[in-house]
Image (cartoon, rainbow, N blue to C red):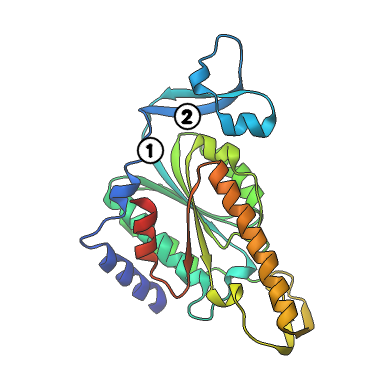
């Protein structure tokens, strides 16, 4: 285990001593039923089980179908992409690793099983369900060591993968910078879904001008750009519009979410999200 991983492990476990985020996660056990699937409404079906979000999206009625209750799983998706290799305070990737550790240790301390997967446009690494705290060491080390430059994020592919592969109703936590768009309605209808957005304050409110050689962290392409106040203003407007659409998607599908900046304490923001 490298030094950075060890330091981050010590930090996360100290923060959890005496305060357990997992107690909040465990509150989401539904009504004693396990979601099985969505199906089109048929005459005689219980109208109380109509999923109105999906019905509105598909323009025809769908209902939730349930099985008997099963053990709840915690599924954490660490979203990889070249854009998380950035940070004016701390790298976004490092903050995401800390969040991963906090959530994983909390869930395990609460006797819940944790599944962790790393995903860009497909599954990069999968860690099977576990209640063993030692397994979290490996996931955090991978989060810190994985090379994200050149990786392209496909949030829709992740949503589709989770919808197909996670069968039992679960608490699903997505950790990433969310610069991609996706239809999360079906995933949110099936699972208790959380979105944890990690951003750097500088990338949202940049304040510099002049000619710069910028490198695309996904394609690796260089572009010499003359940056001025008007260009920065337009950049901020585009980003604000993207985030507004993202929040509307979350609100429409009752997806709990928070934004954590690289200069903030992830522990405090997670407690606020999960209380």
Query: Horizontal and vertical percent for residue 231?
Result: 74, 78
From what the image shows, is residue 177 above or below residue 245?
Answer: below
Q: Nearer the viewer, residue 227 or 70?
A: 227
Residue at far left of view: 18
Task: Name the residue beneath numbered marker 2.
Answer: 35
Residue at the spot 70% in from the left edge and 77% down from the top edge: 232
Q: Taking 178 as reference, is 1 left or right?
A: left
Residue 45 shows up from this direction: yes
Q: Residues within 10 Å of mark 2 (few under 14, many from 20)?
A: many
Residue at far top of view: 44
Mark number, residue 72: 1
Residue 132 shows up from this direction: no
Counting every numbered tag in the picture gives 2
Residue at the spot 62% in from the left edge and 83% down from the top edge: 207
Query: Horizontal and vertical percent for residue 83?
Result: 62, 69
Place residue 138 in its image quadrant. Answer: bottom left
Q: Residues within 10 Å of mark 1 (few under 14, many from 20)?
A: some
Q: Nearer the viewer, residue 267 or 134?
A: 267
Q: Taking 85 as reference, is 12 left or right?
A: left
Query: Horizontal and vertical percent for residue 96?
Result: 47, 65
Quadrant showing the N terminus: bottom left
Question: Which structural element holds mark 1?
Answer: loop
Q: Taking 201 as reference, is 11 left or right?
A: left
Q: Nearer the viewer, residue 93 or 146?
A: 93
């Amino acid at each position: 285990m490298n030094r950075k991983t060890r330091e981050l492990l010590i930090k996360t476990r100290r923060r959890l001593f005496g305060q357990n985020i997992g107690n909040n996660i465990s509150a989401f056990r539904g009504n004693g039923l396990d979601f099985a699937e969505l199906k089109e409404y048929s005459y005689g079906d219980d109208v109380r089980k109509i999923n109105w979000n999906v019905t509105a999206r598909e323009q025809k009625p769908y209902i939730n179908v349930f099985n008997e209750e099963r053990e709840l799983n915690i599924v954490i998706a660490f979203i990889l992409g070249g854009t998380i290799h950035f940070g004016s305070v701390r790298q976004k990737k490092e903050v995401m690793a800390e969040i991963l550790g906090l959530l994983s240790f909390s869930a395990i301390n609460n006797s819940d099983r944790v599944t962790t997967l790393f995903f860009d446009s497909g599954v990069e690494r999968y860690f099977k369900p576990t209640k063993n705290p030692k397994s979290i060491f490996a996931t955090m080390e991978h989060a810190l060591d994985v090379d994200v430059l050149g990786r392209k994020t496909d949030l829709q592919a992740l949503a589709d993968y989770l919808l197909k592969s996670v069968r039992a109703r679960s608490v699903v936590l997505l950790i990433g910078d969310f610069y991609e768009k996706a239809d999360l309605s079906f995933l949110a209808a099936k699972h208790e879904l959380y979105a944890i957005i990690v951003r750097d304050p500088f990338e949202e409110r940049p304040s510099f001008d002049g000619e710069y050689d910028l490198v695309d962290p996904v394609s690796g392409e260089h572009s010499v750009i003359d940056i001025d106040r008007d260009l920065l203003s337009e950049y901020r407007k585009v980003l604000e519009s993207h985030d507004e659409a993202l929040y509307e998607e979350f609100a429409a599908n009752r997806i709990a979410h928070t934004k954590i900046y690289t200069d903030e304490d992830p522990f405090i923001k997670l407690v606020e999200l999960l209380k």
